Amino acid sequence: MIVLDVIIGGLLTGGIYALLAAGFSLQYGVSRVLNVSHGEFIMLGALAAYSLYVPFGINPLVSLVILGPIFFIIGSLTNRILFERLRRIAGSIEVFEGQSILVSFGLLFIIQNLALLAWGADERGYKFLVIPINLLGSIFAANRLVALSLAVVIGLSFFFFLVRTRLGKAVRAAAQEETGAQLIGVNIQWMHGLCFGFGASLAGFAGVLISTMFTVSPFMGLPYTIIAIIVVVLGGLGNIIGSLVGGLILGLIGSIVLHIEPGLELAVLYILFMLILLIRPKGIFGK
Amino acid sequence: MPIIEGERVSKNFGGLAAVVNVDFHIDQGEIVGLIGPNGAGKTTLFNLISGALATTAGTIRFKGENITGLKPHQICKRRVARTFQSVKVFSNMTVLDNVLAGSLFGASTGMRMHDAKAEAMELLEFVGLSAKEGSLAKDLTIANQKRVEVARALATKPELLLLDEVMSGLNPTEVAQVTELIKKMRDKGITVFMIEHVMKAIMDISDRIIVLHHGEKIAEGTPSEIAKSQKVIEVYLGD
Amino acid sequence: MDIIRSNPERFFLLLFSIFILIILAIIPSYIADYYVSLLVSIFKFTVLTVSWATFCGPTGYISLASAAFLGTGMYVTALIGEKVPLPLVVLFGGLASFLLALLVGLASLRIRGIFFAIFTLGLSEGLRHFMNWWEISREGRMGRWVISADYLTIFYTMLMILIMTLLTSYLIRRSKFGVALQSIGEEEEAARHIGINVNAVKVITFAVTSFWIGATGGIIVTQWLYVDTSTAFDVSYSFTPTLMALFGGIGQIYGWVLGSVVFTIITELLLTEFPYYYMLIFGSVIISVFLFFPSGLVGVVIKWRKGKLVE
């Protein structure tokens, strides 16, 4: 059934989008860094998963658990070394936002080059659970379904964290209104590092999941960053839950376009993106 | 004919009524004060006159022309200028350049750089800031920054000047200086509409006073009439 | 504003620039081809940087649309280059860019700060994807053959475009427009109230400065025999002008020129000497500039001169 194909395909892509957008949204929403190198962290996650699986046979699902904390540390350190200093130097929050885009661009270059040196420029892939499964009359590959389920699990856990736990609520408060959050006792500096780190972990997760389904290379990062930006704007800058939902919506839209006119998906997403910026820059769920 | 009049001017923000059916008029050469408790809608009314905000309802006429809905730069060209409650000088430009900008773009068209500069220097003299012409605006005291704003507004050759709390944050000497300046402006033929919280100053200088409360005009009259008005006293004491 | 400040210095700079331009005009006969194309590269990036900074410098906007304008110019040449004489093609490239910028400006210049940056990034990337899809599915091709011009034509055309760009920028800054732009950058609301038609100033400046970017694309593409959407709309063309302007120092024209010249030479050196590490070094330089030299090269020069005066 075509409709089911489109929906499940859309949810699958959307689930991945939601994950990578959520990380990006955390970094912009709380740390106020529009991290253009976000995609590079995704790429690192993907290549790391590859390197753990192919020579060492470590199951990507296990890699998720290993890489999560590592990426968190890398993210927090990056925030501490680069962005905390920039925060102090910049005159205003607008200046900081502008400059941090460019600093993260520099970071993009560095990470990509390091990846090129470590892994070389070739595209690589590995086969993981490439077993066809019959679901309600349509055939899907097992790895895609597993990736979708994991994306859902991670996404839901994150959602649960944001909505039910004290720390999660503090994160959302900090994303919406930093001064207000500080007034109710949130340690904003610590929060910046925490969220940047979390964001990096989510990127890593997305990367691992992507590697189970698609080929990966050191150049794969930027398109994902752009998608993250689009999703986050659609969902509302600073609204982390909005980006989860926005990711799913965009995944569905992409899937629909794919069935009508393949090759135009990204262009359509861009047009949507620009329209939202023009008509309702706060996004669907922005306040 | 009054130089400016407003008829049933109203502004709503979503559900919040900031200005409600305000009628007002000011005659040429008057100094009219606008007072009221915080949140009464005074600055909003100024924003509606200067075009910074669009009215929800009502008309505003300047020298007989309907200016409701015009953009700020168009209203400025028609000779209405204003200062802002939170001083908006061009911080990283010199004092002279701040005023120069007003001369270049205000109601005068096609002014040459040379003449505009001369005019700016004159205005700095008028407000008493000649000594500081080369300083960056951000390096000045608040009192002097307010003077820069006034000079810049004057450079646009207004017939009506809206002053928004130009005396706030000033010490008594500075307040007296600004009062003198306003009188000098009136002598030059400029009509002044001013929002103020410094009661003594505004009572001294105004020909008439309009009182707003919760967006509505609740009283209007000479300073002595307003001082004795029961309604006004309640509004201020009640807060 | 620098009208009043140090006039003799300005005069000297002007003389120096004219001197340099004369040298550049006669130099191709005396140096190797490689250096001629290096100079063309320097011209190209300087045009991009100065055009970008003339609007974005005073107003504080970050436009990432330069790649869209450059690519548009390139594609105009690719599409009509065979039927129309070269000078006209270059002009049309500039015109197409101008019109695009006008449209984009009218639509988006009321958007503030970071939204404008990502909007223009979306424009550049979106245009690339759209053109790519169009070429592949509607035209059945991945790229196009382009007419080529000899390297001397390219050199002198680029030099002329550079001169025109510098002139345009200088005239804008020194005119009422320059004052208006600065005022808008400082306090947009106050600028409105002193009679500046803010939207018109922004849109016109944005469009006018993009003209030369389009023209540059129009001529530069003739260096290569073949062009496709990834080369034409390469996203780094959107980021590099920003970086170069900031590297040089955001306040002054000569800072932008200095930044783009030094930056291009460094990039060229890195590419040839350390092809495997060039991005690493490049990225580190970018980060260092922001963290340690926020005022750019101009800032360094000023500090150095102040130091000397003190001694």
Image (cartoon, coloured by chain):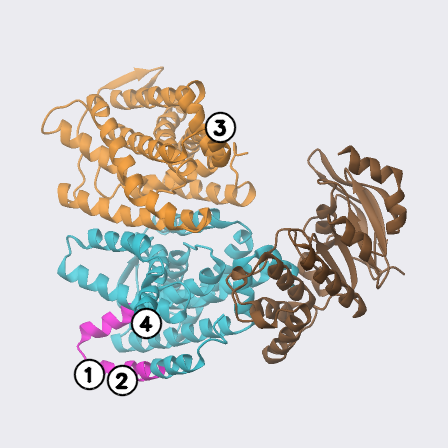
Chain colours: A orange, B brown, C cyan
Label 1: chain letter: C
Q: Are marks 2 and 1 in contact (CB under 8 Å)?
A: yes
Residue stretch in magenta: C18-42
Q: Position of residue C248 (x, y in %)?
A: 34, 64
- The residue that disc 1 covers is C30
Q: Is residue A240 left or right of residue B190?
A: left
- The residue that disc 4 covers is C310
Q: Is residue C1 left or right of residue C64?
A: right
Q: Are marks 2 and 3 in contact (CB under 8 Å)?
A: no
Q: Are marks 2 and 3 on the same chain?
A: no
For the point 29% across and 35% down, the residue is A76
Q: Secondary structure at mark 1?
A: loop
Q: Position of residue A124 (x, y in %)?
A: 17, 36
Q: Are marks 2 and 4 on the same chain?
A: yes
Q: Is residue B147 left or right of residue B209?
A: left
Q: In whole angstroms, how far apart are the C-alphas of marks 2 and 3?
A: 68 Å
For the point 37% across and 79% down, the residue is C13
- The residue that disc 2 covers is C26
Vertical order, B139 against C28 (above or below):
above
Residue C224 appears anywhere in the view: no
